[in-house]
Amino acid sequence: MNATTSKGCTNFRLRRVSRVISRHYDAHLSASGLKVTQYSTLSHLVKLSPIRPVDLARKMGLDASTLTRNLKPLMLAGLVEQGDGTDARSRQITITEAGRSKHADAHAMWKRAQLSLNDLLGLDRVLALHALLDDTMDVLNTAGLTDESTD
């Protein structure tokens, strides 16, 4: 094998690790009634609300249909609201007080999941993984392969 080839599929490996780690976070968050994807959405909205759906999707690195699918249960639960605009592009997603409260309650559970993962993998490995993933996203952003801004 030379430097231009790798053994196995990078996509499969990333998705497999992602699924295992998502299940880890979901197990810790289960008492809150949130999935890790919902907690992440609320976390973004705590910082960015109100925000247009297209801008939220970009910030989260999601396509519009995935964001819509992720927002639906949060709206039904009264955790977020979508305000009417003059057109679809001017609508605003806003986190409600119930959403802020749910996020605050779930934050301690998320923190336990993070600390548990740090203990399991070792902090040095987690920090190295974060650096590698951040660097990878920078390369992909520079190559124009993402819609994500580098903020």
Image (cartoon, rainbow, N blue to C red):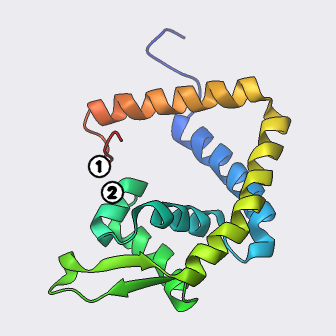
Tell me if residue 49 comes above or below residue 148 in the rendering.
Answer: below
Question: Disc 2 to disc 1, how far (Cα)?
Answer: 6 Å
In the image, what residue type sits under mark 2?
Arg
In the image, what residue type sits under mark 1?
Asp
Which image quadrant is residue 63 in? bottom left
In which quadrant will I find the N terminus? top right
Q: For this rendering, which residue is in front, 104 or 43?
A: 104
In what element is the residue under mark 2?
Answer: helix
Tell me if residue 30 comes above or below residue 91 in the rendering.
Answer: above
In which quadrant will I find the C terminus? top left
Q: For this rendering, which residue is in front, 9 or 118?
A: 118
Q: For this rendering, which residue is in front, 96 or 70?
A: 96
- Furthest residue to the top? 2
Which image quadrant is residue 30 in? bottom right
Earlier-in-chain disc, 2 versus 1: 2
At 58% from the left and 41% from the top, the residue drawn is: 14
At 59% from the left and 83% from the top, the residue drawn is: 98
Q: Position of residue 61 (x, y in %)?
A: 40, 53
Q: Position of residue 25 (x, y in %)?
A: 73, 57
Q: Which mark is residue 45?
A: none
Q: Position of residue 38 (x, y in %)?
A: 58, 69
At 54% from the left and 26% from the top, the residue drawn is: 132
Q: Position of residue 137 (x, y in %)?
A: 42, 35
Q: Are marks 2 and 1 in contact (CB under 8 Å)?
A: yes
Q: Residues within 10 Å of mark 2 (few under 14, many from 20)?
A: some
Tell me if residue 46 comes above or below residue 89 in the rendering.
Answer: above
- Residue to which mark 1 is pinned: 147
Horizontal side of 105 relative to 53 (left or right) equals right
- Residue to which mark 2 is pinned: 58
Horizontal side of 140 relative to 69 (left or right) equals left
